[in-house]
Image (spheres, helix red, strand yellow):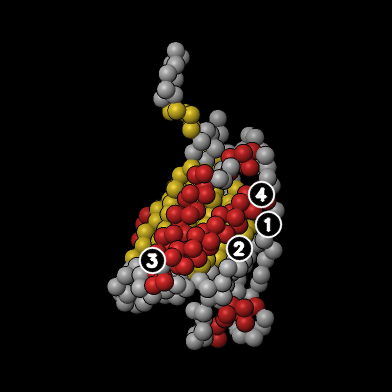
Amino acid sequence: MSSPMVLSDQVVVEPKEVTTPVPADASTLRAHSFGMTDPGKVRTNNEDQFLVAVLDKALRVQYTSLPRPKTQHSSSCCQLFVVADGMGGHAAGEQASALAINSVEDFVLETFEWFARFQAGDGDQVLADFQKALGQANARILHEARRNPQWRGMGTTLTLALSLNDNLYVAHVGDSRCYLFREGALYRLTTDHTFVSEMTQRGMLNAEQAAHHRWRHMITNVVGGDKPELKVEVHKLGLEAGDRLLLCSDGLTEMVSETLIAEVLAKQLDPETAAQTLIAQALQAGGRDNVTVIVSRFDAETAT
C-alpha cells in the first residue's frame, strides 16, 4: 500500500494529485458510511449540516417481455459526502450551510455527468465540475442574502468528497476538514483557509502558537460571506481497501487532537461507532461548538 501525500498547515500541496486509472479487472471498493451532528454543550442552535448520499446509475424497467428485475444498477459504486459549517447571526449560519448542501445536491442531480467523466478517465474535469458546483452554491447564498437583509454576510465552510470506485475527489472551502486514515496513519487532505493557517505556512507561527492564537477562527475563504470571489481547493487520489475517510467540522478538531482521532479510527472499525465515539470525545472535552462527523470505511469487493 502507498501513502497519500500528507497535507498540514505547514505544507501546501498541489491540487489535482495524479491517480492511476483503475484496471478493468481490479476489485471495486464499497463504502460503508455514517454521519451525525450534535449542537454541542454551549450553543443552543446547530449551524452545521451534513450529507451522505449514494449515487447509482439505474435503469428502471416499466414493461418488458424478458425476465428482468424492475430496477437494474450500474456496477460503479459512488458515494457523496458533504460537511458545511455555517456562520452568521439570526439563524443565517443555518441557512447558509443548508443552502450550500442543497445547491450541491441540485448540481449533482441535474448537471454533474460524473459517470461519463469517470469512464472517460477525465478526473480533472470531475474536479472542475466540483469547482463549478461550489461556485454555484456561493452565488446562491449571496443571492439569498441580498433578498433577506437579516441574512446579509452569511457564509459557510464546505468540504465535499466523492468516492467513485477506487478514486476519491475532494473539493474544499473553509476550515472544516477531510482526513484519510490508512495503515494506522492519519493524513489531512485539506488545508484550513484561515488567517492563522496562512501565517503558519509563511513561517510566522509555529504549530503550538497557531493552536492557541486568538485569531485561529478567522476564516479567509468561505462560501457566501461578503466577497463574490471564491477559491476552491481540489484534490484527487487513489483509494485502497481498508482506508477510512473522515469529514468533520472544526467542532471536532478544536476539541479532539489528531492523535486521539487516529486512535479512535484505529480501534473502531465500524463507521457508526467511530462517529459516535468522536462526537462523544468532543463533548467530553467541552463541546464548545457544533460538531459534525462523517466516517466511511472502504472494503474490497471483487468486480464481476
Is there CB contact under 8 Å for labels 1 and 3? Answer: no
List the residue tagged with mark 4. 125
Q: Position of residue 153 (x, y in %)?
A: 47, 73
Q: Amino acid at mark 4?
A: Gln
Q: Outermost residue, top direction?
A: 65
Q: Position of residue 257 (x, y in %)?
A: 47, 73
Whole-Å distance between the Cαs marked 1 and 3? 33 Å
Local secondary structure at mark 3: helix
Q: Earlier in the sequence, mark 2 or mark 3?
A: 3
Whole-Å distance between the Cαs marked 2 and 3? 21 Å
Count of numbered circles on the image:
4
Q: Amino acid at mark 1?
A: Glu
**Circle 4: is it few (<14), some (14-19), or many (20+) Cα within 10 Å?**
some
Q: Nearer the viewer, mark 1 or mark 3?
A: 3
Q: Amino acid at mark 3?
A: Glu
Q: Position of residue 49 (x, y in %)?
A: 40, 61
Kindly identify the residue that appears in the image at 58 percent across and 42 percent down.
113
List the residue tagged with mark 1. 17
